[in-house]
Amino acid sequence: MRFNRVGEILKSDQDKLEKFRGVVENVRGVPLVGALGGLLSNDNTQLETISDKNVLGLVNLLLKFNESLGNIVLDNEKIERTIEKMERPFFKMRVSGRVRVATAREVNDGATGLFSETKYALADDKKRKALWLLAWAASGNDYYYYKIGKGFNKEVVYMKLYSQISNATEELAYLLNWAEDPSFMVDLGVVKRFAKDKYTYPDYEVDEVIDELTRKQVLYMLDEEIPRGTENKEYRRALALIIKEKTNKYYTIPPNEVAELRELYKKVVENKPKALRESNSKLEMDKKLKNDCEYLISARDAGVIQPGEFVFKIIGTLRERGYVTKVSEKQYKIIKEALEKVGDRLRSEKLVRTPEIDKLLETGENTEIVDSEDAPMPEISEHELAEMDKLYEEYGLSEDLEDFSNALGNGFI
């Protein structure tokens, strides 16, 4: 890359210019440093729209970030995955006139009455925002940037980064100053321990809630019942969650949201005539059950799952009865586990691709069940970006660029 503009601005400070060139040409594995290099290079046709003071501020940011945090990013692989676990939901139940910790089953099912509280590794909101920016800088994933509650201009590739920096100068300045304090490594250690400490929910409570419909059944029924194009905000939000889980294998609707969807489903059912409600419900459940079972049979025929699996005894009985018989919770669990097993094997790197396998991958997108605990964070889709932009407009968050030379200027170096 060539850096004519930077060279012109730093012609009287050759030491800084050489330091800058050394970093951009030799440092690898620190996404923010690489991105800033691109922003400041001749490749950025919009660079001339940035003032000299702000170009200098960007140079200082690049050098300061690399000096203070570059090694931390390089020495802590996937540090963003640790940071994203610095806050997590803690699930409780409102049941029998009291509030208690949820059971493992109630969490998995998103049981009626479930709600969540957020637990934080660090109580200081400024520190949490600073770490979200570190996660963004270390990964390049805009998901983490949005966690600080700021929007940005996405129109031009390089200027997107300029907008992000401009809108988060205060948080970036705090991060860089904090990184020089001994307390930073102490707090980062607290976050690491918190991320590893997984809470185990109790296996049983005397008043444990076991809903009639499984989690999967509730989502399926809502997907079928809610009309597309509705102006009802609750309905639209429910559809958005369900569609996201169906189309993004790394996303799972949080348990507390499932509990809310259960309440919404009750409202949907109450608004339908009883006879039609019962008839449609039965037909839809039979259809879904048949699709899942036939998918497993195709997986067996393709060699993805063994023919001797117990699930095929259940499927054999259901098939004989035309999939119109009642399925117990235990039987449905076995079918669900078989679907998970097929999904795991289809995602295996050792899988040999065949036409049958390709067909399974294509038809199984809405069937496979994914544990997202350790899945990589998804990139944000254009639709989600548009929805977030609406929120920023609603809450008055600005995308206007500002002169940030004072925040990122010579005071840092």
Image (cartoon, rainbow, N blue to C red):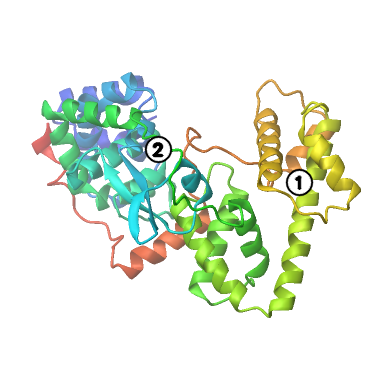
Residue at figure coordinates x 82%, y 36% from the top left: 313
Q: Which residue is labeled 2 in the image?
A: 140
> Amino acid type of disc 2?
Gly
Residue 246 image point, x, y percent: 62, 51
Residue 52 image point, x, y percent: 20, 45
Where disc 1 sits, the SS reads helix
Q: Which quarter of the rendering shows the C terminus?
A: top left
Q: Which residue is labeled 1 in the image?
A: 292
| Outermost residue toward the right in this view | 320
Q: Nearer the viewer, residue 340 or 381?
A: 340
Please indicate whether residue 147 sits to the left or right of residue 412 in the image: right
Please indicate whether residue 179 sits to the left or right of residue 162 in the image: left
Residue 343 image point, x, y percent: 67, 35
Give the mark nearer the N terminus: 1 vs 2.
Answer: 2
| Outermost residue toward the front in this view | 206
- The picture quadrant where one finds residue 250 is top right
Mark 1 vs mark 2: in front = 1
- The picture quadrant where one finds residue 188 is top left
Where disc 2 sits, the SS reads loop
Please indicate whether residue 186 sits to the left or right of residue 89 in the image: left
